[in-house]
Amino acid sequence: MENVDATFVGERLIIEETGAPLEKLRLEAFSPPQPAAGQVLVRMLAAPVNPADLNFIEGTYGVKPQLPATPGVEGCGVVELSDAADYQPGDRVIFLRRAATWASHTLVAADALFKLPSAIDPLQAAMLKVNPATAWRLLHGFGKPEAGAWIVQNAGNSAVGRCVIQLARQLGIRTLSLVRRPELLEELQLLGGDVVLVDDEAGLVAAKAALGGATAALAFNAVGGDSALRLMNLLREGGTHITFGAMARRPLTVPNGLLIFRDIQLRGLWVTRWIEHAPDAEVRAVYADLAARVAAGSLVQPVDSTHPLAAFPAALARLTAADRAGKVLFAP
Ligand SMILES: NC(=O)c1ccc[n+]([C@@H]2O[C@H](COP(=O)([O-])OP(=O)(O)OC[C@H]3O[C@@H](n4cnc5c(N)ncnc54)[C@H](OP(=O)(O)O)[C@@H]3O)[C@@H](O)[C@H]2O)c1
């Protein structure tokens, strides 16, 4: 194994305490460490900014930062140095566990890595771990709907929502998606959404009409509040309502009748828990399937913009821009 050049200086974003991302993030220079036995040093190609990253910095995520911390739930990189038999310099990889990806380099245990097909686009690969797998688990982890059955979801334009639309179409499952911005209706139908409607009370009435008396096997909730309730009203008797996000930061209110007379099932999903607890072979088989779809161009997440690490204020500003059209990524 080669050694890290002692004069080489990398860079990374760090937080020393939790709080508002723009106030707490700062860029620092560091010397990428030498891998110990079983470790790999990865040079980062790209890492997205996900809602979970912001929650991590704010201290409101399911995993609390051990401070000081470099954020970054996921990303794609190239092996630079390896002291693990299965990985060679030049291999393209993603990280199945948190890996401090908002950096030029990150040091990880080899068993946390997943090797990518060589033809895969690095920006798409950087977004493979979280949202495609979440969509996959939503569609498979709660009793896979039969072909032709309906699922309903809110935040249809989110990265997860778009992955659900594409995967469900490939699996023969029909999707009804609610979105908060009417200008997205046509775009999501072109992506493969069977029905796409605005997420309001008129949209609920239109959704019932579009289903024509059918009801949904599963409901995927990334918003909460009234939007989550609209999804409950579209579920079949005994259908499952899965909360995996809380973009509106509003709790669920569940009418008694939906539990008593319709027996709807309320569940939650955290893809991190699945990665940690499912058998490793199952997790890797799902990522192999998803990576093949991404490499073939049949599972795509739009990219809004890429930024160097030093331009993190500009990257954060894009997140709330009215014209944001996809994921914001760091590309060191
Ligand atoms: N539990 C898990 O394992 C897991 C895994 C992945 C993601 N998630 C969660 O899933 C959600 C979506 O993640 P993502 O990466 O796909 O998000 P994203 O691509 O950044 O998109 C965010 C979505 O939320 C919508 N939105 C933003 N603020 C909203 C509000 N106040 N009310 C209603 N909708 C709002 C946006 O609407 P517009 O389209 O109109 O901008 C957009 O569709 C997040 O809550 C994330 O934390 C959870």
Image (cartoon, rainbow, N blue to C red):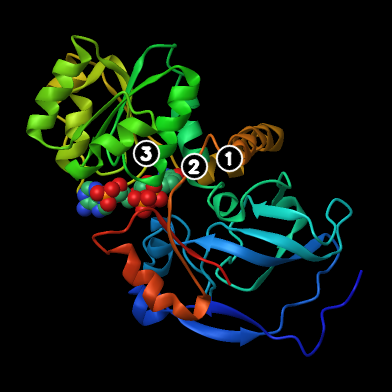
Q: Disc 1 or 3, which lies upstream in sequence?
A: 3
Label 3 and label 2: CA atoms lie apart by: 11 Å
Vertical relation: 102 (above or below) 154:
below
Does residue 120 appear left or right of residue 310 in this picture?
Answer: right
Residue 205's x, y, as percent? 10, 24
Label 2 and label 1: CA atoms lie apart by: 6 Å
Q: Which residue is drawn at 55% across and 39% down?
A: 274
| Mark 3 nearby-residue class (10 Å; few <14, some 14–19, many ≥20) | many
Residue 15's x, y, as percent? 47, 78
> Label 3 belongs to which residue?
161
Q: What residue type is labelled 3?
A: Gly
Q: Which amino acid does label 1 sit on?
A: Val
> Label 2 belongs to which residue?
300
SS at mark 2 in the image: loop
SS at mark 1 in the image: helix
Q: In which quarter of the image is residue 243?
A: top left
> Label 1 belongs to which residue?
294
Does residue 165 appear left or right of residue 293 in this picture?
Answer: left
The quadrant of the rendering that contains the N terminus is bottom right
Does the rendering let one see residue 16?
no
Does the rendering let one see residue 34?
yes
The quadrant of the rendering that contains the C terminus is bottom right
Q: Is mark 1 within 8 Å of ligand 1?
A: no
Marks 2 & 1, CB-CB < 8 Å contact? yes
SS at mark 3 in the image: helix
